[in-house]
Image (cartoon, rainbow, N blue to C red):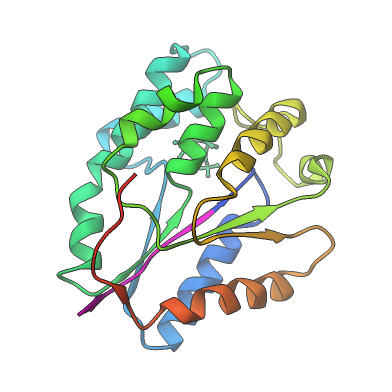
Protein backbone atom coordinates (compact mmCIF):
# COMPACT_ATOMS: atom_id res chain seq x y z
CA UNK A 1 0.00 0.00 0.00
CA UNK A 2 1.24 3.46 -0.81
CA UNK A 3 0.61 6.70 1.05
CA UNK A 4 0.68 10.32 -0.06
CA UNK A 5 4.07 12.08 -0.19
CA UNK A 6 5.48 14.63 2.24
CA UNK A 7 7.19 17.36 0.20
CA UNK A 8 9.32 20.16 1.70
CA UNK A 9 10.25 23.39 -0.05
CA UNK A 10 13.19 25.04 1.68
CA UNK A 11 15.45 27.98 0.96
CA UNK A 12 16.80 31.28 2.12
CA UNK A 13 14.49 34.26 2.56
CA UNK A 14 12.98 35.69 -0.61
CA UNK A 15 14.10 32.99 -3.03
CA UNK A 16 10.54 32.60 -4.33
CA UNK A 17 9.51 29.76 -2.02
CA UNK A 18 5.95 30.97 -1.54
CA UNK A 19 5.38 31.59 -5.28
CA UNK A 20 6.81 28.21 -6.19
CA UNK A 21 4.87 26.44 -3.47
CA UNK A 22 1.59 27.74 -4.85
CA UNK A 23 2.59 26.72 -8.40
CA UNK A 24 3.36 23.23 -7.11
CA UNK A 25 -0.05 22.97 -5.43
CA UNK A 26 -1.69 23.86 -8.78
CA UNK A 27 0.30 21.15 -10.58
CA UNK A 28 -0.78 18.60 -7.97
CA UNK A 29 -4.41 19.65 -8.28
CA UNK A 30 -4.33 19.44 -12.10
CA UNK A 31 -2.83 15.97 -11.75
CA UNK A 32 -5.81 15.01 -9.53
CA UNK A 33 -3.63 14.58 -6.46
CA UNK A 34 -5.30 15.69 -3.22
CA UNK A 35 -2.99 18.18 -1.56
CA UNK A 36 -2.63 20.72 1.22
CA UNK A 37 -0.13 23.39 2.15
CA UNK A 38 1.38 23.81 5.60
CA UNK A 39 3.57 26.84 6.06
CA UNK A 40 6.07 26.99 8.93
CA UNK A 41 6.04 28.95 11.07
CA UNK A 42 2.26 28.57 11.14
CA UNK A 43 1.54 32.00 12.61
CA UNK A 44 -2.14 31.21 13.34
CA UNK A 45 -1.66 28.79 16.27
CA UNK A 46 -1.12 29.97 19.88
CA UNK A 47 2.64 29.35 19.62
CA UNK A 48 2.66 30.70 16.07
CA UNK A 49 1.28 34.02 17.27
CA UNK A 50 4.16 34.36 19.70
CA UNK A 51 6.61 33.52 16.90
CA UNK A 52 5.00 36.17 14.69
CA UNK A 53 5.53 38.76 17.38
CA UNK A 54 9.16 37.70 17.75
CA UNK A 55 9.77 37.96 13.98
CA UNK A 56 8.04 41.27 13.39
CA UNK A 57 8.70 43.21 16.61
CA UNK A 58 12.43 43.75 17.06
CA UNK A 59 11.75 45.06 20.61
CA UNK A 60 10.32 41.67 21.63
CA UNK A 61 13.29 39.70 22.90
CA UNK A 62 13.55 35.96 23.47
CA UNK A 63 16.70 33.96 24.15
CA UNK A 64 17.90 32.14 21.02
CA UNK A 65 17.20 28.80 22.70
CA UNK A 66 13.62 29.74 23.63
CA UNK A 67 12.90 31.02 20.12
CA UNK A 68 14.29 27.78 18.69
CA UNK A 69 12.12 25.61 20.90
CA UNK A 70 9.03 27.63 19.98
CA UNK A 71 9.63 27.04 16.25
CA UNK A 72 9.95 23.32 16.95
CA UNK A 73 6.87 23.30 19.22
CA UNK A 74 4.97 24.99 16.37
CA UNK A 75 5.76 21.95 14.17
CA UNK A 76 4.65 19.54 16.91
CA UNK A 77 1.34 21.43 17.10
CA UNK A 78 0.68 20.11 13.55
CA UNK A 79 2.24 16.63 13.92
CA UNK A 80 -1.04 14.69 14.08
CA UNK A 81 -2.58 16.67 11.23
CA UNK A 82 0.43 15.95 8.99
CA UNK A 83 0.37 12.22 9.73
CA UNK A 84 -3.40 11.96 9.23
CA UNK A 85 -3.24 13.81 5.91
CA UNK A 86 -0.54 11.49 4.55
CA UNK A 87 -2.15 8.27 5.72
CA UNK A 88 -5.90 8.40 6.46
CA UNK A 89 -6.72 11.21 4.01
CA UNK A 90 -4.29 10.25 1.19
CA UNK A 91 -3.43 13.91 0.85
CA UNK A 92 0.00 15.10 -0.26
CA UNK A 93 1.42 17.64 2.20
CA UNK A 94 3.56 20.47 0.85
CA UNK A 95 5.61 22.21 3.52
CA UNK A 96 6.77 25.80 2.96
CA UNK A 97 9.80 25.55 5.30
CA UNK A 98 10.30 22.78 7.83
CA UNK A 99 12.82 21.24 10.24
CA UNK A 100 15.76 22.16 7.98
CA UNK A 101 14.95 25.88 8.32
CA UNK A 102 14.54 25.36 12.05
CA UNK A 103 18.05 23.97 12.41
CA UNK A 104 19.76 26.24 9.84
CA UNK A 105 18.50 29.56 11.25
CA UNK A 106 19.27 28.70 14.87
CA UNK A 107 22.64 27.09 14.16
CA UNK A 108 23.52 30.24 12.17
CA UNK A 109 23.09 32.19 15.42
CA UNK A 110 25.75 29.98 17.01
CA UNK A 111 23.63 27.28 18.67
CA UNK A 112 24.96 23.73 18.45
CA UNK A 113 23.73 21.98 15.28
CA UNK A 114 22.82 18.69 16.97
CA UNK A 115 21.13 20.50 19.88
CA UNK A 116 19.02 22.31 17.30
CA UNK A 117 17.91 19.07 15.65
CA UNK A 118 17.01 17.29 18.90
CA UNK A 119 13.56 18.80 19.59
CA UNK A 120 12.39 17.74 16.10
CA UNK A 121 13.51 14.12 16.55
CA UNK A 122 10.40 12.05 15.84
CA UNK A 123 8.86 14.44 13.30
CA UNK A 124 8.26 12.80 9.88
CA UNK A 125 11.05 13.24 7.32
CA UNK A 126 10.05 14.60 3.92
CA UNK A 127 10.01 12.05 1.09
CA UNK A 128 11.50 14.77 -1.09
CA UNK A 129 13.02 18.18 -0.30
CA UNK A 130 13.60 21.02 -2.75
CA UNK A 131 16.17 23.61 -1.69
CA UNK A 132 15.89 26.89 -3.60
CA UNK A 133 19.36 28.27 -3.79
CA UNK A 134 21.12 31.44 -4.87
CA UNK A 135 24.68 31.64 -6.14
CA UNK A 136 24.73 35.29 -5.08
CA UNK A 137 23.02 35.90 -1.73
CA UNK A 138 23.14 39.66 -2.31
CA UNK A 139 20.61 39.25 -5.12
CA UNK A 140 17.91 38.50 -2.57
CA UNK A 141 18.37 41.76 -0.68
CA UNK A 142 17.21 43.68 -3.75
CA UNK A 143 13.73 42.19 -3.50
CA UNK A 144 10.87 44.40 -2.40
CA UNK A 145 10.22 44.45 1.33
CA UNK A 146 13.58 42.88 2.16
CA UNK A 147 14.83 43.79 5.64
CA UNK A 148 11.39 44.08 7.24
CA UNK A 149 11.81 41.00 9.39
CA UNK A 150 14.37 39.99 11.99
CA UNK A 151 16.55 37.65 9.87
CA UNK A 152 16.67 39.63 6.63
CA UNK A 153 20.29 40.73 6.78
CA UNK A 154 22.72 39.64 4.04
CA UNK A 155 25.54 38.56 6.41
CA UNK A 156 23.15 36.44 8.46
CA UNK A 157 21.69 34.83 5.33
CA UNK A 158 25.20 33.70 4.34
CA UNK A 159 25.54 31.94 7.69
CA UNK A 160 22.14 30.30 7.25
CA UNK A 161 23.12 29.08 3.79
CA UNK A 162 26.29 27.49 5.25
CA UNK A 163 24.16 25.57 7.78
CA UNK A 164 21.61 24.48 5.17
CA UNK A 165 24.45 23.06 3.08
CA UNK A 166 25.15 20.54 5.86
CA UNK A 167 21.89 18.82 4.88
CA UNK A 168 22.76 18.45 1.20
CA UNK A 169 23.63 14.77 1.61
CA UNK A 170 20.20 13.93 3.02
CA UNK A 171 18.41 11.41 0.84
CA UNK A 172 15.99 12.94 -1.66
CA UNK A 173 17.41 16.47 -1.23
CA UNK A 174 17.45 18.50 -4.47
CA UNK A 175 19.18 21.85 -4.92
CA UNK A 176 17.61 24.17 -7.49
CA UNK A 177 19.40 27.42 -8.37
CA UNK A 178 17.06 30.34 -8.94
CA UNK A 179 19.48 33.12 -9.97
CA UNK A 180 18.75 34.51 -13.41
CA UNK A 181 15.87 32.10 -14.04
CA UNK A 182 12.26 33.01 -14.64
CA UNK A 183 9.45 31.76 -12.40
CA UNK A 184 8.30 29.28 -15.05
CA UNK A 185 11.72 27.74 -15.54
CA UNK A 186 12.10 27.13 -11.81
CA UNK A 187 8.52 25.81 -11.71
CA UNK A 188 9.32 23.24 -14.44
CA UNK A 189 12.49 22.10 -12.67
CA UNK A 190 10.61 21.62 -9.40
CA UNK A 191 7.84 19.66 -11.09
CA UNK A 192 10.30 17.32 -12.80
CA UNK A 193 11.69 16.43 -9.35
CA UNK A 194 8.29 16.04 -7.66
CA UNK A 195 6.31 14.24 -10.38
CA UNK A 196 7.77 10.76 -9.72
CA UNK A 197 6.45 10.92 -6.14
CA UNK A 198 2.87 12.02 -6.75
CA UNK A 199 1.24 8.64 -7.16
CA UNK A 200 2.34 7.53 -3.72
CA UNK A 201 5.43 6.47 -1.82
CA UNK A 202 6.18 3.39 0.30
CA UNK A 203 4.00 3.40 3.37
CA UNK A 204 6.66 3.54 6.12
CA UNK A 205 7.24 7.09 7.30
CA UNK A 206 10.83 8.01 8.00
CA UNK A 207 11.42 10.11 11.11
CA UNK A 208 14.10 12.63 12.08
P1 LIG B 1 8.90 32.96 6.56
O1 LIG B 1 9.52 34.21 6.00
O2 LIG B 1 8.99 31.79 5.63
O3 LIG B 1 7.51 33.18 7.11
O4 LIG B 1 9.79 32.55 7.81
N1 LIG B 1 12.50 30.24 10.80
C1 LIG B 1 11.54 29.45 10.25
C2 LIG B 1 13.26 29.84 11.89
O5 LIG B 1 14.11 30.57 12.37
N2 LIG B 1 13.02 28.61 12.41
C3 LIG B 1 12.08 27.76 11.91
O6 LIG B 1 11.88 26.64 12.43
C4 LIG B 1 11.30 28.20 10.78
C5 LIG B 1 10.25 27.30 10.21
C6 LIG B 1 13.03 31.66 8.79
C7 LIG B 1 10.03 33.46 8.82
C8 LIG B 1 11.42 33.31 9.38
O7 LIG B 1 11.47 32.29 10.37
C9 LIG B 1 12.70 31.58 10.25
C10 LIG B 1 12.51 33.00 8.38
Determine which quarter of the picture holds residue 46: top left
Relative horizontal placement of residue 34, taking residue 179 as reference (left or right):
left
Residue drawn at (50%, 26%), measured in percent from left and top? 113
Relative horizontal placement of residue 200, taking residue 134 as reference (left or right):
left
Residue drawn at (46%, 72%), measured in percent from left and top? 25
Q: Residue furthest left?
A: 88
Q: Is residue 34 above or below residue 125?
A: below
Q: How far across and how far down the image is residue 208, in percent?
A: 34, 44
> Magenta residues: mostly which secondary structure?
strand
The foreground one among 203 and 90 is 203
Q: How far across and how far down the image is residue 162, in percent?
A: 68, 35
Determine which quarter of the picture holds residue 43: top left
Residue drawn at (25%, 47%), measured in percent from left and top? 78
The foreground one among 160 and 169 is 169
Q: Is residue 122 above or below residue 1?
A: above
Is-magenta flag for residue 2? yes
Q: Is residue 184 above or below residue 153?
A: below
Is-magenta flag for residue 168? no
Residue drawn at (35%, 24%), measured in percent from left and top? 69
Q: How far across and how far down the image is residue 104, in percent?
A: 55, 34
Q: How far across and how far down the image is residue 71, in percent?
A: 38, 32
- The stretch of residues the image draws in magenta is 1-9
Q: Residue furthest bottom?
A: 31
Amino acid sequence: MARAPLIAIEGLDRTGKTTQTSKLLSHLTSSKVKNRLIKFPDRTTPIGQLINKYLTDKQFELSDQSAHLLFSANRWELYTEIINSLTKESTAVVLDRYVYSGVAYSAAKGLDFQWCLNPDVGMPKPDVTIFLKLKDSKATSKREGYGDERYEVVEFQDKVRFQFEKFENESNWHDIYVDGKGIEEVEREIWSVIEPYINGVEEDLHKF
